[in-house]
Image (cartoon, rainbow, N blue to C red):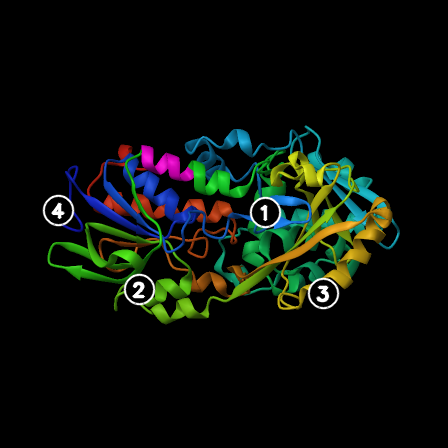
Amino acid sequence: MTSAARPSGRPEGAAAVVIGGGLAGTTAALALADAGLRVTLVEGRPRLGGLVFSFRRDGAAGELTVDNGQHVYLRCCTAYTDFLKRIDADRLAPLQDRMDVPVLDADRMRLGRLRRTALPVPLHLAQSLATYPHLSPAERAGVVRATLALKGLDPADPALDGVDFGSWLRRYGQSSRAIEALWDLVGIATLNATADDASMGLAAKVFKTGLLSAPGAADIGWARVPLGEVHDTLARRALEKAGVRIRLRTRAEAVSRTDDGWQVSVANGPHGRERLAADAVVLAVPQRETHGLLPDGALADKDRLLEIGTAPILNLHVVYDRKVLRRPFFAAVGSPVQWVFDRTHASGLAGSPDGAGGQYLAVSQSAAQAEIDDPVAKLRARYLPELERLLPAARGARVTDFFVTRERTATFAPAPGVGRLRPAARTRTPGLYLAGAWTATGWPATMESAVRSGTAAAREALTELGFPQGQLPQEAA
């Protein structure tokens, strides 16, 4: 076996073990295998994809393929876009030609739109903001002033990490209505936190990158097929084609140094325990699991990982016996409902004899701390009347199925001060690297952050193994 950190030259026959088969781990494994390493990917679940997955459900409308939650990305998510291309899935998750977000005011029953033109930044949003009906003229002018102030900030400035976004917005004259109808409309969905609970640094990253970096940066994309088809089926095919050995239903129990590299102790129910030898190990699992696997001394203070909180996302799945929504999605203000997506075709409902003519809506509720543990009956009683209020066509429709998916630890909590807790990809111990959306990518907990973290971990591993710069995986712009 080669040494854990080789000073120069291509390490012949080097081996790597990646622990975790989510987006971060899959990205790292692909990058390492593409560079010529012998890679083993260990995942405790019976599938890949981490918290981005699908499952089958039998109901009154027939068998459906259900995504655990609605996941979207933006054109500015260049690393995730490259990942989709790498696994041959980009055609299955297309982007809008131009950003266009229908926003329904539930109190006034008035529809507005946030959409861009082809004009340069920031004029690309000027027309949309000028006609946005959910804000007064004075509030729109205030948004312009805050946007100009935001444009001058550096999201990487450590001072911004300790400030909450809500206080900053109020300092710049944003009303409660402006925060609800614009800033939180975008921020809750991307940060998984309200403005008052979000780090100013992460909020600045979201708004500067998504709205102020390029005219098309905020164009929205989402999978038109089940998430499992993309992040499990196609990802697995790409990994296997790259030569990665995939070990599902296999749990990593310990990671330790040896005289000539690393050893990963794993357990697989029917096959018992075994030890995997490697020159490099990537931990691509959640922060608490990482804390349990990290050897002493790998981080200056690994207990800080336990200070990184988590935030939940709740998804409500409603199947109607008829079409009640004409658009692919919409957002709401003045309502407990946040974002609603049409999943009729992706779920298979459209092709099911039992679901013919019906429609399947997914209601995505981020920052759902107050409701994540509510019983299904309580959520049904709260949200079905609200959907009828928002969608007149739902008032005469019959609900054939209603169920809930809950991700209690969907993302890391982007609270003020979290930036100082997020570790870099390289640890203090050569040959051991960290990946995950919660690591120090500069992004909030998104699919983009997960992919960037996997690329960063692979780059660090290959650099320490002595690969020349030209052979390292490319970082996204």
Of the two numbered discs 4 and 3 on the same chain, state the one appearing first in sequence: 4
Q: What's the mark number on residue 377?
A: 3
Marks 2, 3: nearer the viewer: 3
**Is label 2 in contact with label 1 (beta carbons under 8 Å)?**
no
Q: CA distance from mark 1 to mark 3?
A: 20 Å
Q: Which numbered dot is residue 460?
A: none
Above/below status of 289 relative to 17: below
Q: Quadrant of residue 234?
A: top left
Magenta span includes 91: no
Amino acid type, label 4: Thr
Q: Residue 263 appears in which quarter of the rendering?
A: bottom left
221, 154: nearer the viewer: 221
Q: Are marks 4 and 1 in contact (CB under 8 Å)?
A: no
Q: Main secondary structure of the magenta part?
A: helix
Front position among marks 4 and 1: 1
Cα distance, mark 4 to mark 3? 58 Å
Where's residue 338, x and y in %? 71, 53
Specify which label sits upstream in the sequence, 4 or 1. Answer: 4
Label 3 crowd bin: few (<14), some (14–19), many (20+), radius 10 Å: few
**Tags 1 and 3 in contact by the CB under 8 Å rule?**
no
Q: Which residue is mark 2?
A: 293
Q: Reading the chain from its start, which is encountered first: label 2 or label 4?
A: 4
**Residue at (42% x, 70% y) in the render:** 306
Quickly name the residue at label 1. 66
Q: CA distance from mark 2 to mark 4?
A: 23 Å
Q: Which residues are magenta?
A: 235-241
